[in-house]
Amino acid sequence: MKPSYPLISCICITNSRPKLLQQAISCFESQNYINKELVISYPKNDQLTKELIASNKSVNILQIERDPEETLGNARNHALYKCHGDYVCVWDDDDWYHSSRLSFQFNSLHTVGPGFQASILTRIILYDFTTHLGYLSFPYNWDGTLLCRKEMLLQNQYADRNKAEDTHVIPFLHSRKMLAQINESPFLYIYTYHGENTWSYDHFQIFIKKSHLLNQEFIDKVRALVND
């Protein structure tokens, strides 16, 4: 019999960004969903990440060393094959996650109705390190917030490229009525722009121009969480 709360593998693809990665590890460790593992994929020559993982011995981490030339999409696919969870959750190394993110997204699958295999947030918080401003996002299926049954992703793997490797995954799930959209919980996820993102600042600005600027009190709270 499978446990009531199956193992969730949080997949984090990183490369020599120990300060950002440490925050992602801390957010993982603080999750109130107990049955979890953090899967960290990094290039073989990334000594900084190796040392950081070694210093976090209390955390359940599965290490995957990859070829430095491997694309982001293939790195995600290899992590899918090697992880142990029945479910996987995207765990980017440069964003911030509330301690209830995993439990909230997993439990949502059982409250919206039968047949749902994945959940996604349609409202999140955006934070711009260059301007120190925060925003409530516009309604959108934020790919980076996906939590999904692993077998569904194995059937529709990530594309072999470094950008937009995941854009087909959400339509695949949505068209088959497998995707639970969570509309009113933006506090679960803070998407940050810090200057080293995969996408450019112009891309991030497209998002913030459609979003609602938070008042200063909320911005200060967000800033404290992301350690700006």
Image: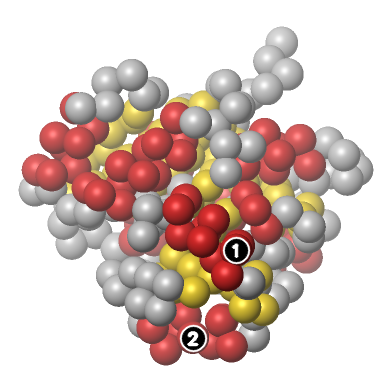
Residue type, mark 2 in image: Gln
Q: Is 144 rendered above or below residue 3?
A: below
**Which residue is the site of mark 1?**
217
Q: Kindly tell me whether residue 169 is visible in this rendering.
A: no
Q: Is 227 rendered above or below residue 204?
A: above
Quadrant of residue 3 within the rendered picture: top right
Residue type, mark 1 in image: Glu
Measured in 3D between alpha carbons, the distance from the residue under mark 2 to the one under mark 1, in whole angstroms, is: 22 Å
The residue positioned 73% from the left and 73% from the top of the image is: 139
Q: Which of the labelled discs sits on residue 186, or is there none?
A: none
Neighbourhood count class around disc 2 (C-alpha, 10 Å): few under 14, some 14–19, many 20 upward: few
Is 45 on the left or on the right of 28, as rendered? left
Image location of residue 150, percent across then percent down: 58, 40
Q: Secondary structure at mark 1?
A: helix
Q: Nearer the viewer, residue 9 or 221?
A: 221
State which quarter of the image contains the C terminus. Answer: bottom left
**Which residue is the site of mark 2?**
205
Image location of residue 13, percent across then percent down: 34, 51
- Judged from this view, the residue extending furthest toward the top is 1
User: Which is more foreground, mark 2 or mark 1?
Assistant: 1
Q: Nearer the viewer, residue 13 or 48?
A: 48
Is 30 on the left or on the right of 79, as rendered? right
Q: Is 119 rendered above or below residue 56?
A: below
Q: Nearer the viewer, residue 122 or 225?
A: 225
Image location of residue 195, percent across then percent down: 30, 74
Q: Secondary structure at mark 2?
A: helix
Count of numbered labels shown in the rendering = 2
Is 87 on the left or on the right of 105, as rendered? left
